[in-house]
Image (cartoon, grey):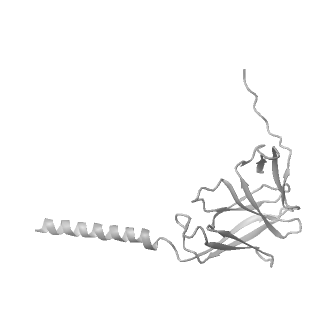
Amino acid sequence: MIKMNSTAVVVTIAVVLGALLLSRELFWRFDDSLDLHSVKSITDGGGTSRLLHIHQRSDSRVDTVRRTFKDVRDGKTDVRLWIEGSADTLRTSITGRYYSEIRTFRIATDSSTQAFLVPNTEHGLPTGWGQVVYFKPDGRLAHIQLMAMNVGDVDEDRILEVFDANRNTFTRLDPATGTWVPVTINAVIPQKKN
């Protein structure tokens, strides 16, 4: 009788836990809204380090653990970016996604560093897809979309390059014009051995 009662208790506990896990997966996995705030340090062309604030807000349901957005067709995330201590605010938005990762790197023709806003990649986006946030020469914030598969540090100088297949050349961001301009790469190309 005691063995039968203990088996029933174990089975009951397993069923209750299983039901809770399944119901969480089906009903409570998604938060009702998204409200994320991140801070990254980037430098301007003069080498001054500044704090970039990134605030994302959406009324669409989101699962930030799995990086999935519930409404990928119509859900919209509003993004505000500003430099600490500045009134300059940059606004943008993204549909069906949010920026799940923010990286800093150098990809510009000057000595500044940039922030790269990477959207949640649940839906098979390319590696180099996102928004590059940078300083213009006058110190104001700007952003440009990057959609490239060939992003890397070809000449190993710790500044990234984007290969533009249409122009058959490597490019970097020109902060003055907000365009991708060709650059000369001093990469050592290994020679084939005979």
Please state the horizontal and vertical placement of residue 69, each as a whole percent of the image: 56, 68
In this view, 119 is above or below 192 = below
Residue furthest to the front in view is 73
Q: Toward the viewer: 138 or 85? A: 138
In the rendered image, which quarter contains the C terminus?
top right
Q: Could you tell me which residue is drawn at 25 percent across and 70 percent down?
A: 12
155 vs 180, nearest the viewer: 180
- Residue 47 higher or lower than 171, as above or below: below
Q: Residue at x 28, y 69 (%)?
A: 13
**Front residue of this view, candidates 92 and 40:** 92
Residue sitting at 72 percent across and 23 percent down? 193
Q: Position of residue 129 (x, y in %)?
A: 69, 57
Q: Position of residue 4 (x, y in %)?
A: 14, 66
Q: Quadrant of residue 86?
A: bottom right
Q: Quadrant of residue 2?
A: bottom left
Q: Quadrant of residue 71?
A: bottom right
Furthest-left residue in this view: 1
